Image: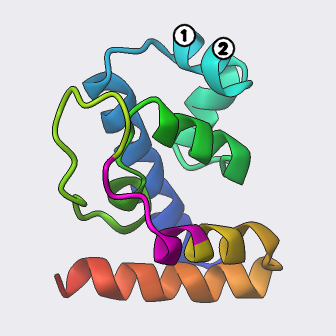
Amino acid sequence: MSTEITEYLFAIGQRFKSERERLGFTQAQLGEKIEATSRTIGKYEIGETEARISQLLNFMRLGADINYILLGSRAGLVTGEPKASYQNAELDMILNAYAHADELGRAALAAVATFVAKHN
């Protein structure tokens, strides 16, 4: 895996952790809610492995700002809001494309997301 992808996954993991903490979940509590072990949540948070799309969607339903996790910019989420108010077709399309992409496709999406995050 390239250094750029490794750095991107680490950044996503750090933002994943930030959202988990913002919402007041321990790794074990969040894991139970999104069908992952606390060890797996820990691996997400250090960028060692990637969350499944279904887990990201479940995390979003708990109030996580998925735009922030993936792209590094807030999507107008009001802290404490039970459901994200920014859900839209474009974000769903991007998440779906990522979920179904091969390694090269995911790398391309990660590169685009990194570029967008740096230029916003």
Is residue 26 located in the magenta-colored stretch of the structure?
A: no
* Residue identifier under label 2: 32
- Residue shown at 22% from the left, 58% from the top: 74
* Residue identifier under label 1: 29
| Residue 33 picture location, percent across and down | 62, 19
> Which quadrant, please, contains the C terminus?
bottom left
Is residue 87 located in the magenta-colored stretch of the structure?
A: yes
Q: Disc 1 on helix, strand or loop?
A: helix
Of the pair 41 and 60, the residue shown nearer to us: 60
- Residue shown at 74% from the left, 66% from the top: 99
**For residue 117, side relative to residue 70 (left or right):** left
Q: Which mark is residue 115?
A: none
Identify whether 8 is placed above or below 106.
Answer: above
- The amino acid marked with disc number 2 is Glu
- Residue shown at 43% from the left, 42% from the top: 16
- Report the span colored magenta: 85-92
**For residue 89, side relative to residue 102 (left or right):** left
**For residue 104, side relative to residue 58 (left or right):** right
For the residues marked 1 and 2, what is the alpha-carbon distance in whole angstroms? 5 Å
- The amino acid marked with disc number 1 is Gln
Identify whether 87 is placed above or below 2.
Answer: above
